[in-house]
Amino acid sequence: MKMNKLIAAITPLFFCPQLIAEPWVDTSNIFLRSNIQLLADQGLINTPVTTFPLMWHDIARDLKVIQLSNLTDQEKNAYSYVSHQFRLAKQSRQTLKANLATDTKRFAGYGDAFRDNNSVTLSSSFMTDSLAANITSSYTHSPDDGDKVRLDGSYIAAFVGNWVFSAGKQDRWWGPAWDTSLSLTNNARPMPALAISRKSAIGLDIPFTDHSIPWTVTSFMGIMDDDRVINDALLWGFRLNFKPAANWEVGITRLAQWAGDGRPHGLDTFWRVLKGEDNCGGNGPTIEECQNGEEPGNQLAGYDIRWSSNILAQPLSVYFTMFAEDGDRKGGLSIFGEERYQLGVDTHINFLSNDWRVYLEATDTYALCSDGVNGDGTSTIGDCYYEHSTYKTGMRYNIRNIGSSYENDASTYVLGFISQGDGETNYEFKFRWLQLNKDNSDRAPGNNQIGNTVSEIAENVLMLSSKVQHNYKNWRFTVGADISQSEFDNDISNKNDIAGYFNIEYNL
């Protein structure tokens, strides 16, 4: 009864046309992100831009002071696109979306509008000076995880000074990469979470200098309420993002699973997690204690760096991510184990009368675990990255990895093209070479709660992905396809596959 009264009280707010709508940039529009990044690379946007959701506040402030007469044609196009999207974000909107697809999205990346095929979504959002909210409800005909009715994308947020407190189910993307990321991506469905974030990246002034370092921080506590070995485990996330110089951006990330059914869950346990006292054999529990299930949590941590410049009038950016188990058995100052890496480079070209962002990205999640099958680190079997001996479902939610779209034990290479400009039609293309589950091993074949969620055996994939998006008045149309060829170990025949989809979106 109380819930019905609450819904009745807030529903009229979603239909007041004088209210503005969205406080942040979400993970749904790769073209918006690319244009924001272009302006940031050129020093026209000063806030850190590799943590999503990304607040509009500082972007809007920087757009106001840009002198159009000083911009190149490419920068003007980016400015026009971002400004247009900001104007849309200021409007109170009710949006109806529909997806038709021949199959689920096997590898979901930034800007992908669906995971499970064939769905209908209705959303409504509003924002005042002190409050923002979005209600998104969707129906999916045949989801992989069995949840046909969903509230993914819904949230309520309050602004207190320079802080934003929110509760809801939001997609997050942490890191500079375009295709996938080692820490957090929108590959898996968003989980319910409480979060706190800095609203504006007001700079940290360096004493005795005129230099100021813009910085932002966000943290959340989510509940992994899906079907897993340890039900209702909590996931804590923390990210500090700052720009020590105009052409450098740095991110520091921590993720930790803890609590859940039958596990320690008090503040004292979380304090041990914060201090990193779950590093078995290092500065945490002993090996024997960990074998008895006394480890307080399961952690991953790392950093990412993006550098951008113009070389011979050609823009060039390089980005790097290291993400690892938070602690190993070396003890002392060694706090990382099973480190995995991602390296990328991007630039801009003009081709067929279009400006394009072109990137090449290499990602490696094939970690040879320190204990290994042989017990001495000499095994060639991985099966440890994103995994854990106690939290056996690992860093996964609703049968998808919360980090890399390609799971553990994978080496991937992606060449991508993203059209840049202010036109009504935008394009994205990806050429993928994927070596999935390289060790040809899985922790629990046939068990979707444990182990690799992408491929139980070694699989080499060549894939071409394409997307065309067209905007017309209140409509947005997206059509795309994934064409792939897979080669398997274990004498399994090659497989060719074509998956197509069509998305339609209308602002009511």
Image (tube, rainbow, N blue to C red):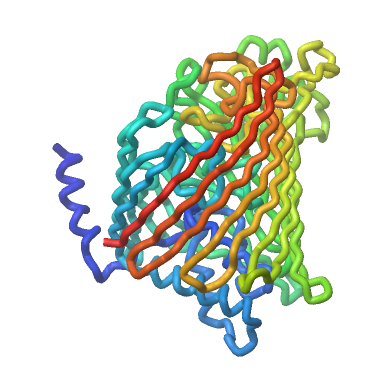
Q: Is residue 323 placed above or below 212 in the rendered structure?
A: above
**Left or right of residue 288, residue 504 in this image:** left
**Left or right of residue 8, residue 142 in this image:** right
User: Camera-side residue: 481 or 145?
Assistant: 481
Q: Is residue 156 placed above or below 16 in the rendered structure?
A: above
**Image point 31% across, 45% down: which residue?**
120
**Res 175 visible:** no
Q: Position of residue 292 (x, y in %)?
A: 63, 10
Question: Which quadrant holds residue 377?
Answer: top right
**Image point 59% across, 86% down: which residue?**
67
Quadrant for the C terminus, please: bottom left
Q: Position of residue 23 (x, y in %)?
A: 42, 62
Q: Is residue 360 placed above or below 474 in the rendered structure?
A: above
**Res 366 visible:** yes
**Image point 53% across, 39% down: which residue?**
498
**Left or right of residue 312, residue 120 in this image:** left
Question: Which quadrant holds residue 185?
Answer: top right
Q: Position of residue 402 (x, y in %)?
A: 55, 36
Question: Which quadrant holds residue 443?
Answer: top right
**Image point 41% across, 59% down: which residue?**
160
Quadrant for the N terminus, please: top left
Q: Position of residue 88 (x, y in %)?
A: 39, 68
